[in-house]
Amino acid sequence: MKILLSGGAGFIGSHLAEELLSRGHTVLCADDLSLGTETNLSVLKGRRGFAFVTADLRSLRATESVFRKQRFDCVFHLAANSDIQAGERDMTLDLGRTFMTTVNLLSCMKRHGVKQLVFASSSAVYGELPGRISENSGPLQPISYYGAAKLASEAYISAFCRQCGAKAWIIRFPNVIGPRATHGVILDFVKKLKKDPRRLEVLGNGRQFKPYLHVDDLVRAILHVWGKSRGELNCFNVAGRGRTRVSRIAGEVAAASGLKGVKIRYGKSDRGWKGDVPQFDYSLDKITASGWRARLLSDAAVKKAVREIWSENR
Amino acid sequence: MKILLSGGAGFIGSHLAEELLSRGHTVLCADDLSLGTETNLSVLKGRRGFAFVTADLRSLRATESVFRKQRFDCVFHLAANSDIQAGERDMTLDLGRTFMTTVNLLSCMKRHGVKQLVFASSSAVYGELPGRISENSGPLQPISYYGAAKLASEAYISAFCRQCGAKAWIIRFPNVIGPRATHGVILDFVKKLKKDPRRLEVLGNGRQFKPYLHVDDLVRAILHVWGKSRGELNCFNVAGRGRTRVSRIAGEVAAASGLKGVKIRYGKSDRGWKGDVPQFDYSLDKITASGWRARLLSDAAVKKAVREIWSENR
């Protein structure tokens, strides 16, 4: 298939591009390189079926020019602001990079008759729902602009499917970890220890307890549901089994550093920052029933990603 | 209180403004007069505490200039595209008039420290959920851009409350009817009969079955929940009890016209247009428990509004 992959130079996007190419698809990655990097693209350049275009999809005109290059069968929309805390300081970040990119892609899909969209959504759309959260849980009350922009995008995608006879796959990612990460708790800890090898300051009290998923498992999950589920609007939670405490991640990062006597200092708040959801628990019944499960449990995914991120950042 | 009322020259906005003024509030109505009218404003002009400004709140600069006029205690945000079918032809309509007006208001509320927002949301955020829909029902999968823009707005309001320590009241309106309506099934039928007194073409098969609420009851409901419910994010379904079939509305309009032998012709589809939700049933448990109930049942509200809209359009 001919695929447009927005955010293809990013953390998850570049991994997904590799796998799509391996499966024989043609992939045009579009990225404004604001968070995506040339380094991430270097693993893709020269591979058969791969092309790249620098494009800021916040602009409808720029988006339209991408669609004029060729006819796509499917859009994978991963372009987004991924820095949740930065989005809290500046309300326009998620609005532009997550939501307006979605609307512009939909608008071009309509004009060019593209009928398939895979969207990188997030557990953040659920806000702080208690209990085991299924895809049908409500109310949806996000507490960060990151989550708000993801939910706003989902809303437009939902209407678009009905209005234009298109199909969409909305996949609600948990915390995703692995090599090429541009944000997230592991990279944050690694960077802090590189700056000061004696102490590690943790945002929040370390009791945050969430499911983590390795990017390799996520990519398999995305392609699994895209291939299996054929409804109009296919919405899936995805995660590895189990959850991991932030205090455990801090311990793993300190241990993998090889440093002696790292002091781990915790904050007082139950959350790392205002829009941080400190605990959540996903129901994976739907994706499990479809025949997918993560190879790595949450704890194992953390262990692996810690090694990978340390080795990238030596 | 000093209140900014967006969409104050519109159908519901002008009724709400009247009641807010009656209760002693100061009300600045902001409206771009794209759907709102000078006629609606005429009932407000000269009343103590009332002021009006023409402003297109799709522009952040225009919104900011409204906030520079005075300090508000609360914003009632009713400005929106209310023409669902027009929004289906042009995806930017709801995006601009409903969603961007919301984001711009939030942005100005943040800058000016305004901590209360009452938002006119809609049953359309639920899409086609089966069964009795409560405020906590999910999934939220709107089928019209109208519903998408309302849900996208709710998402941003939710994050805003957490991020800025504000309070919001999200009230999910059903079909609202009464004098000064600019759209909707009753006005549509009245206009059609004025054009051709012999026949009335109904969009869809007439079996659509929804709760209708008279605007007088709605205004009471809005002010009731605003006064009673004091959480961070207060979300309420509102409707009159019961539901009314579109075929019954057609009959009421024909009967009230005084015309003889009107032929009512039905379409074949179960819905009036693509984004029409043909049936839905609201749980009103939450608003009922808070001490509010509509004075008029759905059927009675229709009967009253038919008379009122005929008398306005003679």
Image (tube, coloured by chain):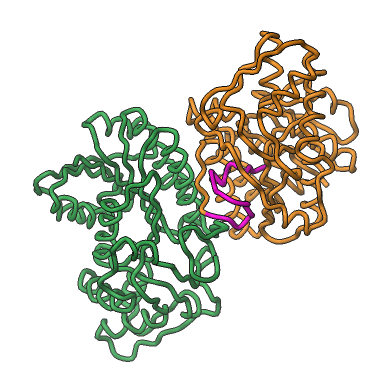
Chain colours: A orange, B green
Which residue is depicted at the point 38% across and 35% down?
B165
Residue A185 sits inside the magenta stretch: no
Query: Left of A14 or right of it: where is A7?
Result: left
Nearer to me, A250 or B288: A250
When the figure is inspected, residue B87 is found, relative to residue A96, above or below; the finding is: below
Magenta segment:
A120-138
The spot of residue B79 in percent (x, y) is 34, 48
When the figure is inspected, residue B111 is found, relative to residue B294, above or below; the finding is: above
Residue A127 sits inside the magenta stretch: yes
Q: Quadrant of residue A70?
A: top right
Query: Left of B198 or right of it: where is B147?
Result: right
Nearer to me, A130 or A295: A130
The spot of residue B71 in percent (x, y) is 23, 32
Query: Left of A59 or right of it: where is B295?
Result: left
Q: What is the quadrant of the C terminus of chain B in the image? A: bottom left
Which residue is depicted at the point 53% across and 44% down?
A128
Q: Quadrant of residue A301?
A: top right
The spot of residue A191 in percent (x, y) is 69, 15
When the figure is inspected, residue A79 is found, relative to residue B184, above or below; the finding is: above
Which residue is depicted at the point 25% across and 62% down?
B180
The spot of residue A276 in percent (x, y) is 55, 34
Query: Left of B166 or right of it: where is A108?
Result: right
As drawn, which residue projects farthest toward the bottom? B261
Q: What is the quadrant of the N terminus of chain B in the image? A: top left
Nearer to me, B25 or A130: A130
As drawn, which residue projects farthest toward the front? A261
When the figure is inspected, residue B126 is found, relative to residue B38, above or below; the finding is: below
